[in-house]
Amino acid sequence: MNSPWWREAVTYQIYPRSFADADGDGTGDLAGITSRLDYLADLGVDAIWLSPFYPSPQYDYGYDVSDARDVDPVFGTLEDAEALLKEAHELGLKVIIDLIPNHTSSSHPWFIDALAAGPGSPERDRYLFRDGRGPNGDEPPTNWRSVFGQPAWTRVSDGQWYLHMFDREEPDLNWRHPEVIEEFRSVLRWWLDRGVDGFRVDVAHGLVKALRDQRVPEGGEPNSDPAVMYEIGVDDDPMWDHPDVHEIYRDWHKVVSSYPGERMLIAEAWTRAPGDLRGYLRADEFEQAFNFRWLQSHWSAREFTDAIVSTLEALNPSRAWPTWVLSNHDAMRHRTRYGDGAQALARARAATLMMLALPGAAYLYQGEELGLPHVQLPPEHQLDPWAEGGNGRDGCRVPLPWSGEAPPFGFGPGDGQPWLPQPYQWADLTVAAQTGRPGSTLEFYRSALAARRRYAHGDKEVKFLDVPKDVIAFRRGRLTVVINCGATPTPLPRGDVLICSGEPLASELPPDTAAWLLSDE
Ligand code: GLC
């Protein structure tokens, strides 16, 4: 691995509920993950990122944390976490864990104390409690909506309101409070002492707010999605990207870099343009920030080119290297974003191959290496509190199929069914069914990751080639990378084909396909 390890690493995101279930209760757990780490080492990734496994009432599936220094019994014990870390390190895998500083669970002892202590108490001051507006205080303190679409303020029985930018069971912390600041320093140290290599910082752009109304045009509605506001011509997000968040990360950087080894911080910061990420990537803040441009793009050469060019341009003058991601636990799987059936799978593989050639780090989401589609679950299985139009994030969180002909497909021992139902059609997509099968998506990912390790690193520069519309081609070092987003075959550039996302080819690249070629110059 190059130094520092994270710069061009491939990190595999594990959603612990849905990866592997060792104890057979239908929910994935840490022991299940440990038992499958050799699969990930063999796949060829460099690191894993674990979504939260801390004690939590699971309203937001673990992003509502009630104790950041322990493991929820549903996922196992602290000893299981330590065993996982040890085993991963023995296999040469780095481990990144999720850190959730914007809010706690409503079951966190601090919030329970805050409710009991009442208005004006020091306990309330760790959160964002305010009196309401209007003659009886029954109007919320600001006009904000939460990310999940509800009002962002909830009123408690004594009449005060508390802010929650996500679920009402996820009260936002007051990041101007010294105890909050000290608590998170201590949580970082707690896990650094146990050997974690990095933290993925949840909602990094949201910790400090300007508590005032969001400006909306006449007749318009407030919205916490800056993209929606932008469309209606409003550039006012008092809840996001406050300049004072950076002080927090400068402080964390000192903590993290005081540890031996190359420990790191990666920001989940939803900024409007990739250039806005630069602030988070200053030398004394985050090592990396997620760049969601590609994850937000449809199958389109124009959109992909925009995503690549704007990212490279935005980061070029800085020391930072980009990151790339196509799928995660919050988004529709990229296979399904690109359409239906075999064509969508071909496109997903092609996009992955192009992404893996770009300079910087790549993040994969569990199951994409199997070509899993986003599942349209029946209403009784849509459990996500963020259920946009009855279609929440559950569809990308269906437990992985490992082996066998019928659910639970080896997810857990025996026949017990997992917490979300797996489609019967997944019999053909299990790890066992795809292992060793020529042309399977799993074998394609293995080959692509091996080829990346060998040929796609070091160079930060990307040179675009002149190619027909609907095709993108670029050179990076000795590698030429081409993707055909159009409807007709396109001539292949010069070079020897190293890997192709679809059918083997002679001198042309079919639609919905990407290839890497190697040339001497
Ligand atoms: C982040 C997480 C998401 C969670 C939210 C609140 O966006 O990725 O899953 O619901 O933060 O913590």
Image (tube, rainbow, N blue to C red):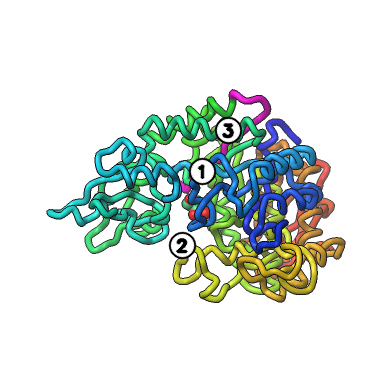
Name the residue carrying label 2. Answer: 386
* In the rendered image, the vertical position of residue 262 relative to residue 135, given as above or below: above
Q: Nearer the viewer, mark 3 or mark 2?
A: 3
* Distance from mark 1 CB to nearest ligand 1 atom below 8 Å: no
* In the rendered image, the vertical position of residue 446 relative to residue 269, given as above or below: below
The amino acid beneath tag 2 is: Trp
Residue farthest along the front direction in this orientation = 116
Q: Nearer the viewer, mark 2 or mark 1?
A: 1
Q: What's the magenta region?
A: 258-276
The residue positioned 55% from the left and 76% from the top of the image is 378
The numbered mark, 2 or 1, whose residue comes first in the sequence reads 1
Can the viewer see residue 284 in this picture? yes
* In the rendered image, the vertical position of residue 59 relative to residue 117, given as above or below: below
Q: Position of residue 140 (x, y in %)?
A: 25, 54
* Distance from mark 2 CB to nearest ligand 1 atom below 8 Å: yes
Give me the C-alpha separation between circle 2 and circle 1: 23 Å
Instruction: State whether the magenta stretch is mostly helix, strand or loop.
Output: loop
Question: Does residue 262 belong to the magenta stretch?
Answer: yes
Q: Position of residue 456 (x, y in %)?
A: 74, 43
- Residue 67's tag is 1
User: Where does the N terminus fall, quadrant-wise?
Assistant: top right
Give me the C-alpha separation between circle 3 and circle 2: 31 Å
At numbered mark 1, what does the secondary structure look like: helix, strand or loop?
loop
At numbered mark 3, what does the secondary structure look like: helix, strand or loop?
helix
The residue positioned 80% from the left and 69% from the top of the image is 404
Name the residue carrying label 3. Answer: 190
At numbered mark 2, what does the secondary structure look like: helix, strand or loop?
loop
